[in-house]
Structure formats: C-alpha cells, structure tokens
Amino acid sequence: GEVSDLPNKEYGDIRKEGKRILVPSLGEDAGGRLFEFKSEKDLETAKSYYVELGKSGPLFYSHTHGNGTFLLQMNGDMEDAEFEKFKTAMDNALKE
C-alpha cells in the first residue's frame, strides 16, 4: 500500500514522526499508523487511547503494538496473522 506523512494534529506535540499506511486489501482509505514518540510514556498515552476506544465497540477496535518509542496501530478488520507480519517487520527493523 501507500505510506504518507501524518498531519501534526495526530499527537503532534508528543510524537517525533508519524506515518499513515494504506492497506488496499482492507478497503479504500483503510490501514493504520506508525508513530515514533518522544518517550515511552508518550507512547503509552497514545496506545491507551486506542485500547480504550476499542472497548467502546467493535467498530472502533484496532490492533496496537508498541516497541520502545514506536507504536503500530492498524485497522481492527485486519486478520490477526496479517497484523503479526506488520508487528514482526517493525520489531525486526528496530533490532537493526
């Protein structure tokens, strides 16, 4: 899919960088986000937002995975096995 920069309004003051990831198999304008935060505390703030939002109903559920100061958030319609591939790719890239 396509990757683009996220506007600053999405966690602008607590993140270093943010990318929007489009995954065509999930539908038009669907995919997720990859953030790099200034601290692990800031990451946890953002991650808890997505977790709490998901508890409000299945429509708002999303997959989340944090590693260090990086947070991956993907559409909840994504199959668990596919999310695992994104998660593994991110973790492997951070090891290098």
Image (cartoon, rainbow, N blue to C red):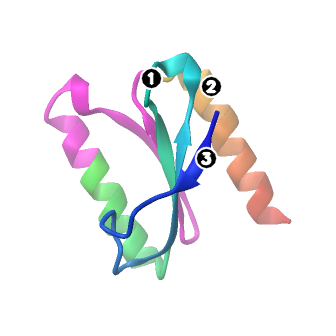
Looking at the rendered image, the quarter that the N terminus falls into is top right
Q: Which structural element holds mark 2?
A: helix
What is the span of residues highlighted in magenta in the rendered image? 51-77
Residue ID for mark 2: 82
**Viewer-side residue, 33 vs 88:** 33
Q: Nearer the viewer, mark 1 or mark 2?
A: 1
Q: Which structural element holds mark 1?
A: loop
Q: Residues within 10 Å of mark 2 (few under 14, many from 20)?
A: few
Residue 26 percent across, percent down from the top left:
49, 20
- Amino acid type at image mark 1: Glu
Compared to residue 41, the image places residue 33 above or below, namely above
- Amino acid type at image mark 2: Glu
Q: Nearer the viewer, mark 2 or mark 3?
A: 3
What residue is drawn where x is 64% and y is 43%?
Answer: 87
Residue 21 percent across, percent down from the top left:
55, 43
What residue is drawn where x is 49% and y is 23%?
Answer: 78
Side of 42 relative to 3 (left or right): left
Residue 96 percent across, percent down from the top left:
86, 65
Compared to residue 96, the image places residue 79 above or below, namely above
The label number, if any, that marks residue 3 in the structure image: 3
Residue 69 percent across, percent down from the top left:
54, 71
Question: Which is nearer the N-term, disc 1 or disc 2?
Answer: 1
The label number, if any, that marks residue 28 in the structure image: 1
**Viewer-side residue, 5 vs 57:** 5
Say whether residue 70 is magenta.
yes
The residues bearing labels 3 and 1 have C-alpha atoms spaced at a distance of: 14 Å
Say whether residue 29 is magenta.
no
The residues bearing labels 2 and 3 have C-alpha atoms spaced at a distance of: 17 Å
Give the image quarter of residue 7: bottom left
